[in-house]
Image (cartoon, rainbow, N blue to C red):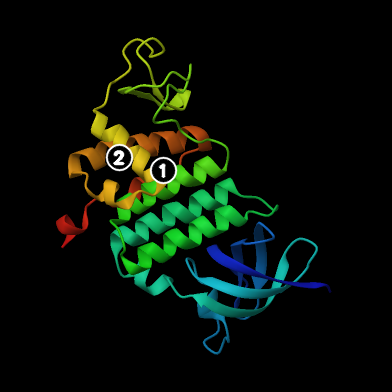
Amino acid sequence: MPTYRDEAVVLRTHKLGEADRIVTMLTRAHGKVRAVAKGVRRTASKFGARLEPFMVADVQLYEGRSLDIVNQAESLGAYGAEIAADYASFTAANAMVETADRLTESEGSAQQYLLLVGALRSLSRNEHDASLTLDSYLLRALSLAGWAPSFDACARCGVQGEHHTIVVQLGGVVCDDCAPTGAPRVGREVVDLLAALLKGDWPRAEASDESTRGRASGIVSAYTQWHLERGLRSLPHVSRASAGESA
């Protein structure tokens, strides 16, 4: 059987038989891959721990008819244990990998791969508030998929300005002339935070207060659910408590 090698981040796993597991991975060069990891549920497995969710590995696979077969796996990023030890990080990571699973297919997805690996690494190192990291990831992943929101110009007519109405169905902020009747308005601080999360401007994002973060998270969640068409099962379980509140 032909073989290939790639970097991969594990999105999810399913039991198969008594000792095997089906592993769904997002790879750097081959897009999303589903493969069988034989014998990984045995305690003597050589690479079972390297094929758990949130782990990043250099994998070698045999091509199969319906499912490929994992032959080797060498760890590149052991993020699972650190993420699982913190509830906010764990729930955020689950929402991230579910989003990546929904946004990617079998074609190459190098940018999506790098974005997800970077977000999981950041969660494992507790570099930023987990909720902010998730919201930034969701906005940027959707942008890579072709659904970039607009936070500096009207998403409908393109007019520049300081707009205070966000309509997720229209793609972001809209001016007063384009805003549907009764559309809720938000403060400038919310729009500024969303723009910072989209750009990865962390000093600006971390200067926001909890109330602003909560309103921004609601908008990000609604925007994500709208474009993915089916709700993310993991999103309602995400902990939105800040590190200070959960301490």
Q: Please report contact status of discs 1 and 2: CB closer than 8 Å, yes or no.
A: no
Q: Is residue 231 above or below residue 172?
A: below
For label 2, the residue is 193
Q: Residues within 10 Å of mark 1 (few under 14, many from 20)?
A: many
* Residue 40 visible in the snapshot: no
16 with respect to 64 (left or right): left
Task: Give the residue type that dot 1 points to.
Answer: Leu
Q: Which residue occupies the foreground of this view, 128 or 81?
A: 128
For label 1, the residue is 198
Q: Residue at x 37, y 55 (%)?
A: 92
Q: Residue 173, percent across and down?
A: 39, 25
Q: Quadrant of residue 214?
A: top left
Q: Quick one: which residue is furthest to the right in this view?
A: 1
Q: Is residue 245 above or below residue 52?
A: above
Q: Residue 185, percent across and down?
A: 27, 21
Q: Which mark is residue 63?
A: none
